[in-house]
């Protein structure tokens, strides 16, 4: 099933483009498909799906697997903002028991990625202009700083992994593959940020991406490839030169590009 992205009348995203993946129903939408739990890009750089087969092989606790899967469903826009889904539907989609699913919902609600809807339902919060400005301010403050901090820790192995991730980004943009773009873009940014040795800031940014991801997917579904932010080549060149300031600026421009597209889409909502 492929759903058409649109923006609701209250200045918020109500529905998003849903691209099918193999293996599981979309919660609350019989026949919709999810799948593709893991994507590896570059030298060991992993994107979505920490709950895939590899995670099980590493004996990750079941509640962490369930949390990671539900988080990625939100992050990559497989749950439409503002569209309630049932807890029972999530249990079936995630192949998990009631307890780990409820724990995952509790954690993601605390992170602002889900809202309780009553009657055993939850939803991804719709994006509004006010929320966008707050998320944008936080991202533009924290993420360039993480990039600047990471510059001192760039190794040949990390650079090679980031180059490979960027190749995946470029390939996805070239083919208009939205899920592949979102996964590779996430992999690129967080491989860089995790090199910053600033775990508190990285955790904050993870929460911000959960709020921003669904709306970015909606915008890409609306405007196509031109709405896929990518200033990675500038960031990579700055890393090769060892220029921390230029790296921070490239990341800032990359974030601003995406924010501008979302703001434009929200401003076009009538009334």
Image (spheres, rainbow, N blue to C red):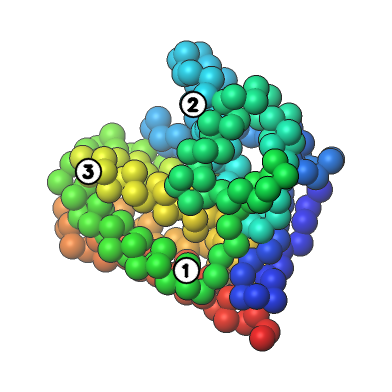
The quarter holding residue 196 reads top left
Q: Which quadrant of the figure contains the C terminus?
A: bottom right
Describe the element under mark 1 as helix, strand or loop. Answer: helix
Task: Give the CA distance from mark 3 to mark 1.
Answer: 24 Å
In this rendered view, identify the residue nearer to me: 57 or 87: 87
- How far across and down, in percent of the image, does residue 119 sit? 72, 44
Tag 3: Cα neighbours inside 10 Å, few (<14), some, or many (≥20)?
some
Q: Which residue is mark 2?
A: 64
Residue at x-position 60% and y-position 30%: 101
Q: Is residue 198 left or right of residue 7?
A: left
- Expressed as whole percent of the image width and height from the top left, the position of residue 227 reads 55, 67
- Judged from this view, the residue extending furthest toward the front is 118
Residue pointed to by mark 1: 132
Q: Is residue 174 above or below residue 85?
A: below
Q: Residue at x 49, y 26 (%)?
A: 64
- The residue indicated by pointer 3 is 198
Residue at horizontal 30 percent and vertical 56 percent from the top? 143
Q: Are marks 3 and 1 in contact (CB under 8 Å)?
A: no
Mark 2 lies on a secondary structure that is: helix
Q: Nearer the viewer, mark 3 or mark 1?
A: 1
Q: Is residue 102 above or below residue 256?
A: above
How far separated are the C-alphas under marks 3 and 2? 22 Å
């Amino acid at each position: 099933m492929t759903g058409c992205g649109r923006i609701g009348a209250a200045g918020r995203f109500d529905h998003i483009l849903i691209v099918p993946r193999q293996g599981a129903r979309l919660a609350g939408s019989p026949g919709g498909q999810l799948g593709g739990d893991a994507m590896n890009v570059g030298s060991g750089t992993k994107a979505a799906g920490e709950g895939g087969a590899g995670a099980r092989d590493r004996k990750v606790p079941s509640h962490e697997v369930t949390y990671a899967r539900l988080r990625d469903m939100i992050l990559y826009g497989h749950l439409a903002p503002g569209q309630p889904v049932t807890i029972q539907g999530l249990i079936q989609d995630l192949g998990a028991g009631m307890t780990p699913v409820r724990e995952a919902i509790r954690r993601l609600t605390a992170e602002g990625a889900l809202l309780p809807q009553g009657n055993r339902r939850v939803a991804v919060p719709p994006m509004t202009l006010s929320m966008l400005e707050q998320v944008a301010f936080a991202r533009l403050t924290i993420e360039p700083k993480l990039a600047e901090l990471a510059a001192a820790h760039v190794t040949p192995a990390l650079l090679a992994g980031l180059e490979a991730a960027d190749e995946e980004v470029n390939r996805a943009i070239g083919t208009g593959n939205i899920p592949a773009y979102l996964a590779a873009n996430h992999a690129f940014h967080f491989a860089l940020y995790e090199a910053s040795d600033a775990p508190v800031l990285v955790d904050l940014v993870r929460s911000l991406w959960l709020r921003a991801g669904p709306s970015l997917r909606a915008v890409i579904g609306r405007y196509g490839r031109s709405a896929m932010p990518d200033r990675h080549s500038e960031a990579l060149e700055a890393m090769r030169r060892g220029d921390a300031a230029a790296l921070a600026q490239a990341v800032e421009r990359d974030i601003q590009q995406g924010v501008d597209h979302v703001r434009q889409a929200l401003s076009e909502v009538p009334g």
